[in-house]
Image: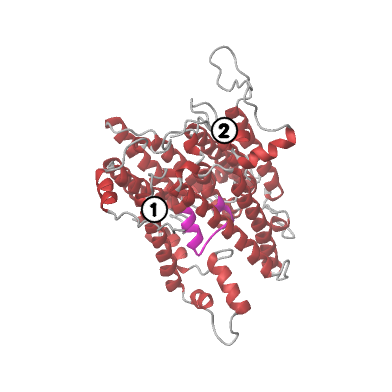
């Protein structure tokens, strides 16, 4: 094996520098003098004495705070709740947090689930009530305050703290690659959608669950941490369902590494957590609790999804005298549900097969990103803020700026087109042609699929994986990190027939 060093790879375990390791950043660095030199003095981690204050970690944290502050400014025109002349759409500042303070009757002191049904999983409902009811109580004693504005700002503060916790998890998982977290900190998606809904509650819990799993080891303490990881992922799943999907990659990788016990304990802990969080509502207020499941069962094709694009193409290019397949699905919701679930299930099976048969065991973040992305690709609902679900996962799975920025640009384009559609629906006047919106949705879908293809390629060719340039195996893998494959996998490979050699033509 060659011992020649590669630019940007520091075999001693020092900090990675993107201007040397990332081709896209290296090209941009030419505008300010070129990449970091071989003889540059780096003082991010001084061996003695005082280093510089603005280390990579502090810069990333400061950038995250700056982005969240700019997000708050961007949403400020809507904070008073006086949405006149559709300013929530013309100024791109709509947020469910403020709208649902009134729609869920929190402004009246209604207790979620007890007094009315809630369209979200229970932990999100608890969260809404925990912040909303004190605001209502304070408003009763002081009628001069704007309850909706106070509620939004309180939520923005807590959700911003969860976003900071998420970036701190990224920094903790990538101590040798702190600049990777700058992708999260500078993300346009974070700037535009951080408090559109309560998604950072689930994201923060899922990130903490992954961090705890990364600390597991094959001993009693490690198994305890596996249980704690499952509890955190279960809490995330009780807020938004998708964090539970991360347990699948953990299990498949544990099977390949013959470390199933910890993964099973984590899955059991997650399941018990979800049940315990739901029971206080599901038993006494079953009908109100069931609203979330009813809504997801009954919802038709939503804007911007794969199915929406197909329905548009049916109407544009199909036979006007007949109903196209996507149009038919929109009128037959149960079949649409089954098909969506089936495609996601098949995608998960393919990802599982990839995890077991890849030449080297994939990293946990790679599989986690693929599973969540597959869910969104085939889902009949893809809300604007769902981009945040993939954001920390793609930073961990594929920390390369080129394709990431292309995806973010596509997300910004979709964000603008989506608000134009909202404005058109509110005014019954077309703002942009529907084809433009479909194009924006298609570009978003295409960039996510491209990221998936690139991640799969790096799983099949691990020498192209940027993270493995600084880590021997999987820094997120916990007890799986550095563990050899199970003996049965080696036996399976030894029984596979050798490839037939290609005959060499003779002159």
State the image quarter where residue 306 is shown: bottom right
Q: Which one is nearer the viewer's eye here, 105 or 398?
A: 398
Residue 384 belongs to magenta span: yes
Q: Taking the image as drawn, is residue 280 in sight?
A: no
Measured from the top left, where is residue 23 in percent x and y? 62, 41
State the image quarter where residue 52 is shown: top right
State the image quarter where residue 114 is shown: bottom left
**What secondary structure is the magenta-colored segment mainly?**
helix
Q: Which one is nearer the viewer's eye here, 317 or 361?
A: 361
Residue picked out by circle 2: 8
Measured from the top left, where is residue 398 in percent x and y? 52, 44
> Could you tell which of marks 1 and 2 lies nearer the N-terminus?
2
Neighbours of disc 1 within 10 Å: few (<14), some (14-19), many (20+): some
Q: Taking the image as drawn, is residue 340 in sight?
A: yes
Magenta span of residues: 372-387
Residue picked out by circle 1: 354
| Residue found 44% across the figure and 55% down from its top | 113
Quarter of the image with the N terminus in it: top left
Which label lies toward us, 1 or 2? Answer: 2
**In this view, 112 is above or below 340:** above
């Amino acid at each position: 094996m060659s011992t020649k060093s590669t630019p940007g790879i520091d075999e001693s375990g020092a900090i990675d520098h993107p201007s040397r390791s990332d081709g896209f950043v290296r090209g941009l660095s030419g505008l300010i003098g070129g990449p970091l030199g071989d003889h540059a003095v780096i003082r991010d981690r001084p061996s003695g004495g005082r280093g510089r204050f603005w280390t990579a970690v502090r810069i990333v944290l400061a950038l995250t705070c700056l982005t969240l502050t700019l997000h708050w400014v961007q949403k400020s025109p809507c904070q008073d709740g006086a949405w006149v002349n559709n300013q929530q759409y013309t100024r791109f500042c709509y947020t469910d947090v403020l709208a649902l303070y009134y729609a869920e009757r929190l402004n009246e002191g209604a207790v979620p689930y007890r007094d009315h049904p809630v369209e979200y999983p229970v932990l999100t409902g608890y969260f809404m009530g925990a912040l909303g009811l004190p605001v209502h109580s304070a408003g009763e004693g002081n009628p001069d305050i704007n309850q909706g504005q106070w509620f939004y700002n309180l939520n923005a503060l807590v959700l911003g703290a969860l976003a900071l916790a998420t970036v701190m998890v990224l920094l903790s998982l990538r101590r040798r690659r702190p600049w990777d977290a700058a992708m999260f900190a500078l993300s346009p998606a974070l700037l535009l959608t951080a408090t559109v809904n309560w998604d950072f509650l689930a994201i923060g819990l899922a990130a903490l669950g992954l961090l705890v799993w990364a600390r597991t080891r094959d001993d009693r303490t490690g198994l305890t941490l596996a249980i704690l990881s499952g509890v955190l992922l279960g809490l995330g799943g009780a807020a938004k369902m998708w964090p539970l999907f991360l347990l699948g990659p953990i299990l498949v990788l544990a099977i390949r590494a013959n470390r199933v016990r910890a993964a099973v304990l984590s899955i059991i802990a997650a399941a018990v957590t979800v049940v315990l969080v739901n029971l206080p509502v599901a038993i006494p207020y079953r009908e109100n609790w069931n609203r979330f499941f009813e809504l997801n069962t009954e919802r038709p094709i939503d804007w911007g999804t794969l199915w929406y694009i197909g329905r548009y193409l049916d109407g544009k290019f199909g036979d006007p005298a007949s109903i196209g397949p996507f149009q038919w699905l929109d009128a037959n919701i149960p079949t649409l549900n089954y098909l969506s679930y089936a495609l996601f299930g098949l995608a998960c099976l393919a990802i599982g097969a990839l995890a077991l048969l890849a030449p080297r065991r994939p990293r946990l973040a790679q599989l986690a990103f693929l599973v969540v992305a597959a869910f969104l690709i085939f889902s009949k609902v893809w809300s604007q803020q769902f981009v945040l679900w993939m954001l920390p996962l793609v930073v961990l799975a594929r920390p390369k700026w080129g394709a990431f920025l292309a995806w973010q640009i596509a997300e910004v384009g979709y964000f603008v087109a989506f608000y134009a559609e909202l404005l058109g629906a509110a005014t019954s006047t077309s703002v942009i042609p529907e084809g433009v919106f479909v194009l924006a949705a298609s570009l978003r879908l295409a960039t996510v699929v491209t990221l998936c293809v690139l991640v799969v390629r790096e799983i099949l060719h691990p020498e192209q994986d940027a993270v493995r340039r600084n880590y021997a195996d999987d820094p997120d893998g916990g007890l799986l990190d550095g563990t050899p494959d199970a003996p049965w996998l080696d036996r399976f490979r030894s029984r596979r027939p050798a490839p037939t050699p290609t005959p060499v033509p003779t002159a």
